[in-house]
Amino acid sequence: MEIFIKNFVENNSLFYFFIIMIVFAVGDFIGIITKAKISSVFVVMAVFLGAFMLGVFPADIVERAGLTQIASMSAAILIFHMGTMINLKQLIAEWKTVVTATASMIVVMLACLLLIPIIGRDNAIVAIPVLNGGIISTQIMSNAATDANLIIPAAFAAILYAVKKFAGAYPASYAGVKEAEIALDAYRNDRKSVKNVEESVKKETKGFATKYSKYFTDFTCLMIAVCFAWISVSLGKTFTAINYSLWALLFGAVFGYLDIVPSRILEKGKASGIFSMLVYVTIIPSLSRVTLDDLASLGLQIAITLVVTIAALYLVFSVLPGWKLLKSKHLAFGVSLCQYLGFPATFLVSHEIAKAVTDDPQEQQVVLDRIMPSYVVAGMTTVTTLSIIVAGIFVVFI
């Protein structure tokens, strides 16, 4: 009987894959019922960290699930996909938001560098791309730290990414609510809808990918994404000193914008979910090496990092003249926090703001017209685009 159980459970990679997917499913469930106020990523990281420390999960659960090799290849594929999502015209139309969001990334960089005496050089270096960006930049920094045998900075990156959305969601929502109240007052006073800063610019012409959309089947889309991932990694490792992530993002952005390949190519290939999960999986092993003492030390350092960086953003964009480009202290502060959220969290937060301030559908649209373009573009500028460039730069200092 013991041999049967061992073969049925312990020696079966699908069992460990199933356990990993249970954790991800629980994270999604909690994220849905809390309307993203508790990040699903936070739940996933917290469960794995607790399970590793208590000895519930084996430290090599990812290896036992047979995911290590495919997960290591997933980042370049997903970055190319993210590149195809970038709407260059929309970024141009919302140029004031782009400038403000970019400036907010610089503020976070400077704040982290000032924290070196407190949190250490390596932690500060990995924190910058993590706070500026999302899962891709976190994966780049966490893996680089792991490869350099920097256990604590690798875990610092993973845990910081897990909690930053939770830390940024409330102030971003609060700032958005304040801006929404101003917009509603203006609307109710003169009964004129508040317009967008700029309307999103849509493509006027159909390119190759749109014209021949039916030929871009699931496998064709996957083939294209894998092809450009292979080229990007080859260029990054063999022929240039530029990190593969920058090549993949560039290829995706250019070919996606020119409509040579479909926008959101992995979604069209019905594979974005699995590759997103695989990228998350790559940062899980770094959590297995964290002890209780490390967690106590990291917890304080992460709290300090989040408090100081958010305070710095508030100082620059609500107290100092950093808000003047957008002509609103509340909106500027909210935009500066979008690097902690990213898309689609910025989209969800915008809808939550609209529903929080009014039940009238027309007034909700007024709020969305004011908040959503800036929040979404800010998230795309920081997390989807520039953070990967930042990670490609800072990874060389690990």
Image (tube, grey):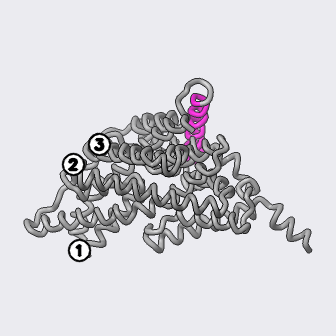
Q: CA distance from mark 3 to mark 1?
A: 33 Å
Provide the secondary structure element on which disc 3 rests.
Answer: helix
Q: Is residue 89 left or right of residue 38?
A: left
* Residue 49 is one of the magenta-drawn residues: no
**Amino acid, disc 2:** Pro
Q: Mark 3 = which residue?
A: 99
Q: Could you tell whether 330 is left or right of 398 in the image?
A: left
Residue marked by disc 2: 321
Secondary structure that dominates the magenta span: helix
Magenta includes 225?
Answer: yes
Q: Residue at x 45, y 49 (%)?
A: 115
Q: Secondary structure at mark 1?
A: loop
Residue plotted at (63% across, 45% down) = 150
Residue 379 location in percent, x, y?
38, 51
Say above or below: 8 vs 270. below
- Looking at the image, tell me whether mark 3 or mark 1 is earlier in sequence order: 3
Q: In terms of image quadrants, where is residue 304? A: bottom left
Residue that carries the numbered disc 1 in the rendered image? 360
The answer to which quarter of the image holds residue 348 is bottom left
Q: Helix, strand, or loop for circle 2?
A: helix
Residue at the (59%, 55%) spot, across then down: 277
Please tell me which of labels 2 and 1 falls first in the chain.
Answer: 2
Residue type at mark 3: give it.
Val
- Residue 155 seen: yes
Determine whether 136 is above or below 253 in the image: below
> CA–CA distance between discs 2 and 1?
34 Å
Disc 1 crowd, CA 10 A, few/some/many (<14, 14-19, 20+): few
* Magenta-colored span: 217-236
Question: Disc 2 to disc 3, how far (Cα)?
Answer: 14 Å
